[in-house]
Image: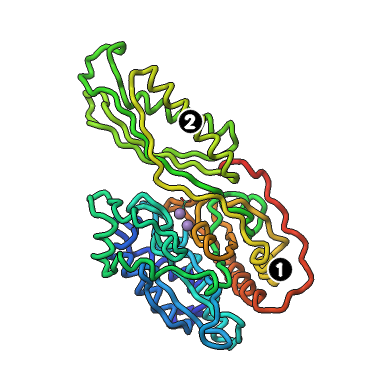
Amino acid sequence: MTDAEIPRTGALSILARCDELATFSTLPDGLIRRVYLSDEHRAVNELAGRWMIEAGMSTWQDAAGNQCGRLEGRTPGLPALLLGSHLDTVPSAGRYDGILGVLIAIAAVDRIHTSGLDLPFALEVVAFGDEEGTRFGRALLGSRALAGTFDPAWLDLTDENGTSLRDAYTAFGLDSDRLGDAARSPASLVGYLEAHIEQGPYLEEAGHALGIVSTIAGARRFAITVIGHAGHSGTPFDRRHDALAGASEIIGLIERTAREAGLIATVGHLEVYPNAVNVIPGRVELSLDLRAEFDADRDAVWHDLSDGMTAICERRGLTVSTRQTHGAPAVACSPRLREAIARGIASTEHPEPLLLLSRAGHDGMAVADVTDVAMLFVRCRGGVSHHPDEHVLECDVAVATDAFEAAVRALAAPPAPALPTATPAAPPTATP
Ligand code: GLV
Ligand code: MN
Ligand code: MN
């Protein structure tokens, strides 16, 4: 099939678009890193905006740099069903996390527009600019702005080059004093649907292409600083205050405590000072990302960890300080929208879908502050994500797009008799 013969809203075209977006990166050698308010962000917004226009939408970039498109419903100005996901990435990312959801949403709108369906609501696609928090260390900046929960204090956050979020908005051509313009009122919205790769192994293990999200796990992130004394590597052990040795013990404690409590914790970032082969580390900064289905479990583990870290540091003659950099409560997906997704899936050949906890964070966590949210999960190979090996099957993208489109149509249709409840996926607490 030549490029010209590939249907614009089919899986092959969606995957080709993922490949095209993957070329906008600050990393060499085909690796992907695309952060909020960067030149690459501007470029993917332009491209996604062009695809939105082809799909029949009017487009704009909102005050927070989210790329938006709208297809009017039966009459102009109706409340909108939001569809979307994010276009930013982690460093060394895959090409589907977030991106696939944006492209499935555009394809679904395109099909509905082409079919001439007259919806009782408008459709809007939002390609969020910051879900990952890669640049400023605070996730969900785009979706928080849309939900009207953006805290102006975040404007003083800085990136690794010392550029403040405020200055980054200015450089992107946005006015940080007008961020409030991105906020949506509950009355202007019907709900939010997001398709996303599972980023976990359960769909693949069960032999299912699609799943429905029950809850998005609540997350808290912390910056932890351990301070000791730098010194010569000839110093005897009993005279040292080695911040890295203390931090290593803390990392072990974090893994042990989280495992025992059945939740997930990750130390993914470490800075060692002065970071020299013959100098005892005097200061270490580490990150902690803590996630659980229930906020109370997550908070109880954080409480135990705080006590444990203090005890380790006291024993080693170190000091420790912690600062929360991100907090998002667990979000239960809306039964009404879950039912629409179940109907969408049922309209395909797919077997009864699995119900899955999302351990990954999503824009829906922020959007839930302003409207109901629900998510469709798509199988990804080996559950691998946040890695260049992220992979989806063309047939899965095809059935996901059909199901997503059908879910939108189901929301427009009169209520039908209830479907059987989706099967919960087991085991709910295993770590991918
Ligand atoms: C985003 O992908 C997250 O779960 O941190
Ligand atoms: Mn991600
Ligand atoms: Mn994502």
Instruction: Tell me the quarter of the picture where residue 343 sits.
Output: bottom right
Instruction: Tell me the quarter of the picture where residue 318 sits.
Output: top left
Please tell me whether mark 2 sits on a helix, a strand or a loop. helix
Label 2 to label 1, Cα distance in Å?
Answer: 44 Å
Side (left or right) of 1 relative to 203: left
Side (left or right) of 403 relative to 133: right
Q: In this view, does 273 lie above or below 380?
A: above
Label 1 CA crowd tier, 10 Å (few <14, some 14–19, many 20+): some
- For the point 28% across and 63% down, the residue is 169
* Depth order, front residue of 382/306: 306
Q: Can residue 245 be seen in this view?
A: yes
Label 2 CA crowd tier, 10 Å (few <14, some 14–19, many 20+): some
Q: Where does the image place residue 146, in percent across and percent down from the top left?
A: 44, 66
Query: What residue did someone put label 2 on?
Result: 305
* Depth order, front residue of 408/185: 185
Q: Where does the image place residue 92, in percent across and percent down from the top left?
A: 37, 52
Q: Where does the image place residue 329, in percent across and percent down from the top left?
A: 53, 50
- For the point 74% across and 74% down, the residue is 415
Q: Is residue 28 visible?
A: no
Indicate which disc residue 346 carries. Answer: 1
Marker count (numbered): 2
Please tell me whether mark 1 sits on a helix, a strand or a loop. helix
Question: Which quarter holds ligand 2?
Answer: bottom left
The amino acid pointed to by label 2 is Leu
Q: Where does the image place residue 239, in percent across and percent down from the top left?
A: 27, 12
Instruction: Tell me the quarter of the picture where residue 247 sits.
Output: top left
**Quadrant housing the C terminus:** top right
* Depth order, front residue of 151/374: 151
* Depth order, front residue of 376/327: 327
Q: In this view, does 249 lie above or below 189?
A: above
Side (left or right) of 334 relative to 302: right
Tags 2 and 1 touching, CB below 8 Å: no
